[in-house]
Amino acid sequence: MGAFPSDGMIQESQSASTPLNAARRSIVVKVPVERAYQQWARVEDLPKFITPLQSVRRIDDTQFSYTWHPDGEEHQGALHIVLQIPCRRIAWRILSNPLMSGVVSFDRRSKQETEVTLKIHSVCDPLNLSLRLEEYLGNFKRLVESEETAQ
């Protein structure tokens, strides 16, 4: 199971009985906070580091559709950006799954270093959720640092 978005579509009627797990992981990237934020804020580029995502398309200013391929199965859904504070925080929820939400925050450590913290609430098991967050943050670090050196 993946961490973002949910691997399977959950029926709303299950939401009361399905336990919701949370995982939080952080990583330091060697780019200015503005650069880290800008990379994550390009929601259509999320598949570059959240590998089960195949595509993300903008619907309007705050809503996006996505195609997700966990374990070889295709799922489609929609996500909504519920909060965006430039260079500080982006929060979202999955519209197609009421049991999935997340927030990414950006904290300046120095002029050239940013701590990126990703927190996800999901029905995924906690260990798998944590492993996925580590994978996605590691991918993000490689992407944003390699694009920074290419500029």
Image (cartoon, rainbow, N blue to C red):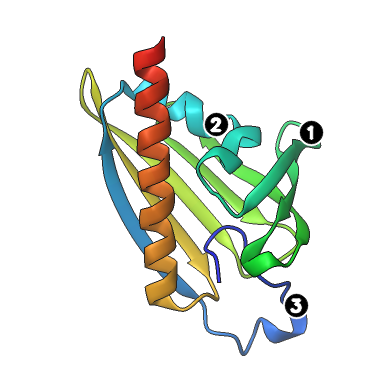
Residue most extreme to the left: 110
Please report the residue visible at 37 percent of the width from the left and 66 percent of the height from the top: 130
Residue 140: image location, x then y, percent:
42, 39
What numbered label is drawn on residue 141? Answer: none
Q: Which residue is mark 3?
A: 12
Instruction: Report the residue at 37% width, 35% height from top.
Output: 142
Considering the numbered disc 1 on the image, is that residue within a helix, a strand or a loop?
loop
Residue 108: x and y, percent? 26, 28
Q: Which residue carries the number 1 mark?
A: 60
Estimate the x, y position of residue 105 in percent, counting from the top left. 39, 41
Q: Mark 2 packing: few (<14 Cα in 10 Å), some, or many (20+)?
A: some
Tell me the residue that label 2 is attached to. 41
Viewer-side residue, 10 vs 7:
7
Task: Report the residue at 71% width, 43% height from top.
Answer: 55
Q: Residue 38: x, y in percent?
A: 49, 24
Question: Looking at the image, is mark 3 or mark 2 nearer the viewer?
Answer: 2
